[in-house]
Amino acid sequence: VEVGDLINYQIEIHNASVVPLFETVIVDTLPASFSYVADTARIRRGGKTEIINPQISGNVLRFSLGEVASGERFTITY
């Protein structure tokens, strides 16, 4: 990897509890020398892939997911 190269991230989420989670937010902190490329985040959930836009504060990304059902699994890539 060289300066300026794009690196793909994938976050896997699994609610292993027996109850749903409400107002769920995934927080990811990028390394200091990295930056998020706008409009690249996608969420694959329930067999569909959709755009998801994080709230960005410096190198911290916050993905608001709402409710996550018991046993639900999905991925966020960017």
Image: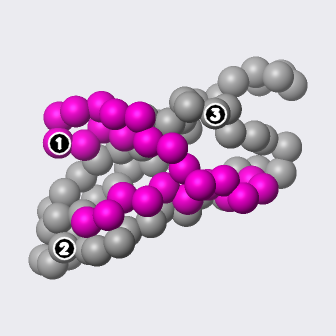
Residue drawn 63% across and 33% down?
A: 38
> Quarter-wise, where is residue 21 in the image?
bottom left
Q: Amino acid at mark 1?
A: Gly
Element under label 1?
Answer: loop
Residue drawn 34% across and 34% down?
A: 50
The quadrant the N terminus occupies is top right
Return the residue nearer the eye: 56 or 71: 56
Residue wearing tag 2: 20
The crowding category of the residue bearing disc 2, from other C-alpha atoms within 10 Å (few below 14, some 14 to 19, many at least 20), is some
Of tags 3 and 1, which is closer to the observer? 3
Which of the labelled discs sits on residue 46, or is there none?
1
The residues bearing labels 3 and 1 have C-alpha atoms spaced at a distance of 24 Å
> Quarter-wise, where is residue 40 in the image?
top right
The crowding category of the residue bearing disc 1, from other C-alpha atoms within 10 Å (few below 14, some 14 to 19, many at least 20), is few
Residue drawn 24% across and 52% down?
A: 73
Q: Earlier in the sequence, mark 2 or mark 3?
A: 2
Element under label 2?
Answer: loop
Q: Earlier in the sequence, mark 3 or mark 1?
A: 3
Q: Amino acid at mark 3?
A: Ala
Is residue 57 covered in magenta?
yes
Specify whether residue 66 is in view. Answer: yes
Q: Amino acid at mark 2?
A: Pro
